[in-house]
Amino acid sequence: MTGVAVLLVLGMAFNGGWRQQEVQTAPRASAPVLSSSARVSLAIDTTARPPVSTTRRAVRLAPPKVPYRGPGTFIQAKLSQKSTAKRGRLVRYDVRVERGLPFDAAQTARIIQGILDDQRSWRGSGDWRFELVSSPKRADIHAYLATPATTDKLCAPLLTRGSYSCQNQKSVVFNAKRWASGAKSYGTNVTGYRRYLVNHEFGHTLGRNHVGCPGKGRRAPVMMQQTKGLRGCRANSWPFPQR
């Protein structure tokens, strides 16, 4: 073999080896960045899969942890917000959140006011309008978000048994256990359940009493005790859902 032939063979061997090293596997998809404060549970598919595929992980937020018992003292929401309704009897209320609960008082007050000022809420009748006030002295109604044990105390002699909420004279008491997790009748729709809860308990302050399911497959009236079950009705958060 001549010197030129030897060089050609060595060059081919070298180039073939270089191409073999260039073959790389596709990069793995990076995992989603989650806040360190988020409480999540990851349902991961552990079955074998090709390295070039991407598989989404199901992320489900866990409800905030609510202690059964709290100190019985409250943080007042220093927030005022007028109703956008132009007519109807004015009802002023304030909001308080028990210390130690994982809920901000001002944010809770905004949620409640947003529900009560919705046209599908009681203001939809034209008879009522609600105004959030920061001073307890100006309030007609006091709204509490409380631990289950404190809810039982504030609701007595009504029996809430650590599981329910109530309206007791000038107080509306929301059980934080329900505020965090909702109820079986609403499934994972905690937002829908909160809307129902606010409208139901404030409905009592307007003189509304409990009613039953009007018929299988129909919307449950907001004054039905939907926390305890739907009895054939469909979950409904609003007094006037079609507005």
Image (cartoon, rainbow, N blue to C red):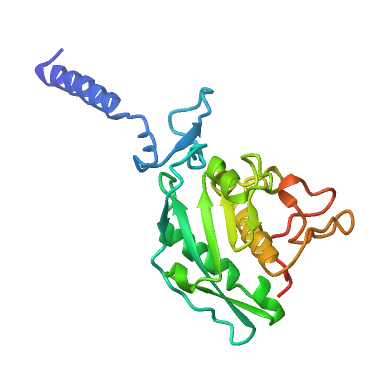
Residue situated in front as seen by the camera: 92 or 116: 92
User: Which residue is more in the foreground, 23 or 173?
Assistant: 173
Vertical arrangement, residue 218 with respect to residue 19, above or below: below
Identify whether 15 is placed above or below 98.
Answer: above
Residue under the point 54% across and 60% down: 143
Q: Quadrant of the C terminus?
A: bottom right
Q: Nearer the viewer, residue 224 or 170?
A: 170
Note whether 207 is above or below 42 in the view shown: below
Question: Residue 87, image x and y in percent?
Answer: 62, 87
The image quadrant that residue 218 belongs to is bottom right
Which quadrant of the figure has residue 221? Answer: bottom right
Residue 39: x percent and y percent? 44, 38
Residue 146, percent from left and from top: 52, 48
The residue sitting at the left extreme is 3
* Residue 222, position as x, y percentages in the image: 73, 61
Q: Residue furthest front?
A: 157
Horizontal relation, residue 135 to residue 15: left or right: right
Query: Looking at the rendering, in which quadrant would you find the N terminus?
Result: top left
Give me the residue at 52% from left, 56% from top: 144
- Work out which residue is located at the far top of the displayed protein and give it: 1
| Residue sitting at x 48%, y 62% | 95
Direction from residue 9 to residue 114 in the image, left or right: right
